Amino acid sequence: MESGPAIFAGTVFALFGAGLLLWTGARVAHRSPVAQGVNPVASATLATLVGSGALLLGMWCFTRL
């Protein structure tokens, strides 16, 4: 019964992290801004860190099953 929330949370974090990393990679590859009005290097770095953190958090949730 307790594995249901862990599966849901892990899936949400993993999908969000993967989506953010793919979107950030596509924006950087096309040399488009990741966030409007922000330093491009800082916004790409922050988005990559947040996406990686979400993926790691999702993997941690899956290890708690």
Image (cartoon, rainbow, N blue to C red):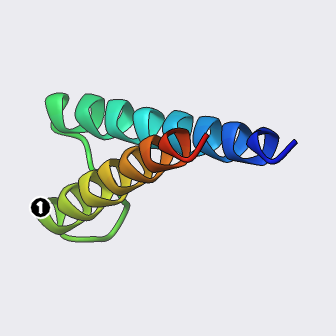
Query: Residue tagged by mark 1?
Result: 41
Dot 1: element:
helix
> How many tags in the picture?
1
Indicate the amino acid at tag 1.
Answer: Val
For disc 1, the neighbor class at 10 Å (few under 14, some 14 to 19, many from 20) is few
Q: Position of residue 51 (x, y in %)?
A: 36, 49
Q: Is residue 63 above or below residue 49?
A: above
Q: Quadrant of the N terminus?
A: top right
Q: Is residue 49 above or below residue 51?
A: below
Q: Nearer the viewer, residue 63 or 47?
A: 63
Q: Residue at x 73, y 39 (%)?
A: 8
| Direction from residue 20 to residue 28 in the image, left or right | left
Q: Quadrant of residue 59?
A: top left
Q: Position of residue 5 (x, y in %)?
A: 78, 47
Q: Quadrant of residue 46?
A: bottom left
Q: Quadrant of the C terminus?
A: top right
Q: Nearer the viewer, residue 5 or 35?
A: 5
Q: Residue at x 45, y 53 (%)?
A: 57
